[in-house]
Image (cartoon, rainbow, N blue to C red):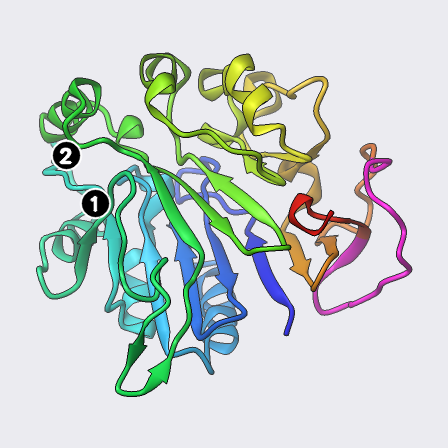
Amino acid sequence: MSIIIKSFAVRDENGQPGDMFYIKHGSSNFTIIDCCIVSDNREEIVQEIIRESKNKDITRFISTHPDEDHICGLPYLDEKINILNFYCVDNKATKPDPSESFEHYCKLRDNKEKHYFVYKDCTRKWMNDNDKNDGKNYGSSGINFLWPDTSDNNFIEAQKLAEEGKAYNNLSPIFTYELNRNIKVMWMGDMEDDYLEKIKDQVKWTDVDILFAPHHGRKSGKVLAEVLKKLAPHIVVIGEAPSKDLDYYRGYNTITQNSAGNIVFECGEDKVHVYVSDDDYKYDTSFLNDEGVQNSKLGNYLGSFKPKGAE
């Protein structure tokens, strides 16, 4: 069975670039990361999620942080799929003028039967602990959290700022999705570069195949050169921030979501096939090999690569 990782090209109700992803695991897991849906696209996106997660037993939602461009439309998503496993960092974030989406975020965050607070090296059944329940093996999702360290003063300060309703970006966790002999991917939410500078030595950095650039690819979220060297990503996905705000990660292979639209990584046994929704994507793709693969349901085929774990 192919594993699907999809990054949606989305914007919130104010036209700001947002984040929303899902992972259709090879095990009986399905993971949604962040939510940014509006009236124009919410039915199409949510119906796709319902369809793709149909035969999965465990569905989790990971919220990186409660900025509107990462939680927009959360009430609608919850209404349609009934979020039972809500993952976020421990926080008491407030907002002076809370939106419906933020109020729903708080409702899920504070529900002890639904929330799971993530932190560095945490373990949980079916997230990264391959366990059995009632005799059924759900398998591990392959998700691991590298940050936050909840005792770290920098994180405690980020919690304080969020509780005061001043800032939320640095609540973002750092986590990876990984399968042996297959792809390894990293997310960092909207973590800002000055915060990353403070915590960089406390994170166990590791090689990745794909890095989703934090803060939608903005210069304010640029990953430090020394961290990039340790990650050695084969592809950096640059988000939908305005071109004037983007850092294009020169020296690294990139896919720019502004131009690519939705991006799909179809992961087989030893190859990853890359698709985008824009048929006219014309950026350099020489870092991908043409395997002659076509799947119109996934989009316009850009090329393929062998993940580091398969080498």
Q: Position of residue 63 (x, y in %)?
A: 31, 48
Q: Residue at x 39, y 76 (%)?
A: 138
Whether residue 307 sits left or right of residue 224 in the image: it is: right
- Which residue is more in the foreground, 261 or 207? 207
Label 2: which residue?
95
Q: Residue at x 48, y 43 (%)?
A: 11
Q: Position of residue 33 (x, y in %)?
A: 40, 52
CA separation in Å, label 1 and label 2: 8 Å
As for residue 300 lying within the magenta part, the answer is yes
As for residue 79 lying within the magenta part, the answer is no
User: What predominant SS class does the magenta segment belong to?
Assistant: loop
- Which residue is more in the foreground, 116 or 47? 116
Assess disc 1: are there few (<14), some (14-19) or many (≥20) residues with their C-alpha within 10 Å of its C-alpha.
few
Regarding mark 2 in the picture, which secondary structure is present there? Answer: loop
Regarding mark 1 in the picture, which secondary structure is present there? Answer: loop
- Asked whether residue 216 appears in the rendered view, the answer is yes
Q: Residue at x 51, y 33 (%)?
A: 206
Q: Please identify the quadrant where the N terminus is shown.
A: bottom right
Which stretch did the figure color magenta? 285-301
Q: Position of residue 61 (x, y in %)?
A: 33, 58
Label 1: which residue?
99
- Verify CB contact (< 8 Å) between mark 1 and mark 2: yes
